[in-house]
Amino acid sequence: MIHAGHDGAVNAQTSQDVEAQPTSRIDQFFRVTERGSTIGAEVRGGLVTFFAMAYIIVLNPIILGSSPDGTGAFLADGNTAHIATVTALVAGVMTIIMGMVANFPLGLAAGMGINSVVAISIAAIPGMTWADAMGIVVLQGIIILVLVLTGLREAVFRAIPHELKIAISVGIGLFIALVGFVNAGFVRIPAGLATPLELGLDGSLGTWPIVVFVFGLLLAAVLMVKKVRGGILIAIVASTVLAIIIQAIAHLGPRYMGPDGVTVNPDGWALTVPELSANWTLPNLDLLGNFSLLGSFRNIGVVAVLLLAFTLMLADFFDTMGTMVAVGGEAGLLDDNGDPINTRSILIVDSCAAIAGGASSVSSNTSFVESAAGVGDGARTGLASVTTGLAFLAAMFVAPIIEMVPNEAATPALVVVGFLMLTQVAEIDWKDYEVALPAFLTIVLMPFAYSITAGIGAGVISYVLIKVVVGKARTIHPLLYGAAVLFVIYFLSGPLRDALGF
């Protein structure tokens, strides 16, 4: 394993590694030989990371493109190919920058979980537009960048209890899984409203689109258990091929909600009808720059905007910290304190990626833990990230393929990602009720209330209240008190607006 000293230089463990000389300028710039790697291994590792991450090009457009904003409008008018193009562009550019600036084998793309929050919990707020929602994403990216540059990231990190950080991730995992089940039609609102949800159609899974979903979910699970790299992408592709065949034979058509609130063609496809298309065009970049930094303040108020930005910041900031430590540990690129080398550079690029994602209307871009797949295949330097980024840029030209992918073929990945996030629940001490109860409320209210903000707010408020009641008020960080007050105002915003007459 390779370790880094405090000056950021990597110390090889053998004299042979120390004496090895760079073979080219690329080798010298990225310190390939110095870190015990080769250019071939870096390129191969970068491609492995791309294939492990490539599912985001399919999923991000479906998540963002399938939900209307608060005015009823769809992002890019529902054109998932346009969203896919910009998703690949921003991921490519920011991953290349990560490699060049931080020299770290880390890929970036639109963050899973964060995109669901933006689509379902932010953009859908009455009166909110997609431009306003993406402005909040830009705002939270700017806040994170300021925290990094001022050294306040440690203060924010300390303010949130470890158990609540874990609970937030677990709760988002359950939320994502529920979104996947609902979007695929595997779980639906029953026509008679006798129960909040039901399995399939009238309790039956006997429709072809649900068969495609179940096939994709089981295939993704098997590939994950067998540790097949790119297993999620393989499952999406295989399920899409099956869906295209079924549609060609059965001609199912789309499933949609009629004006009377009754589902039309309940046996059909949930979003995209999987048909081969000859509509190939050059990449469309019209989404770039379509954001409003201050529009949300006019529509929902300062307090609500700050709370939403805070929610995104938590998910983005702490996921990045965990990801870079996990990938750095796998690559042997941690210093004596257990921190990744070039930590500040990594965090700066990651913060800029959040801003770039919002400014490009494809949600906050963040570091992907799937980068560990490339590290496992030999990646040790930023050259692997450059390779991953170039692969994303090449993917821009095949974005129209996204139009063939139905929800039922893509959403199994949401369930799988939800499972992976749920596995962290074991890190919570469930015997310590002082932290277990707030963690529980955080986790369950996200899917039950269909709101990630509600889950985090309930967790923070209950944690502060319990600690104060048991006489441990001094153990709470001042920032957490401030967050609790903001969440109380957020939950009471309706009555407060009525009382104040606006």
Image (tube, rainbow, N blue to C red):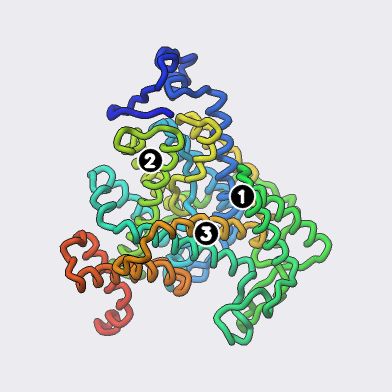
Residue, disc 3: 418
**Contact? badges 1 and 2 (CB < 8 Å):** no
Q: Nearer the viewer, mark 2 or mark 3?
A: 3
Residue, disc 1: 225
Determine whether the residue tagged by mark 2 lies in a helix, strand or loop: helix
What amino acid type is highlighted by mark number 3?
Gly
Residue 108 place in picture, x, y as percent:
47, 43
Question: Are there few (<14), some (14-19), or many (20+) residues within 10 Å of tag 1?
Answer: few
Vertical comparison of 119 with 49: above or below: below
Residue at the image position 51 percent from the left and 62 percent from the top? 176
Mark 2 or mark 3: name the one nearer the start of the chain. Answer: 2
Residue, disc 2: 349
Q: Nearer the viewer, mark 1 or mark 2?
A: 1
Question: Are there few (<14), some (14-19), or many (20+) residues within 10 Å of tag 3?
Answer: many
Q: CA distance from mark 2 to mark 3?
A: 26 Å
**Contact? badges 1 and 3 (CB < 8 Å):** no
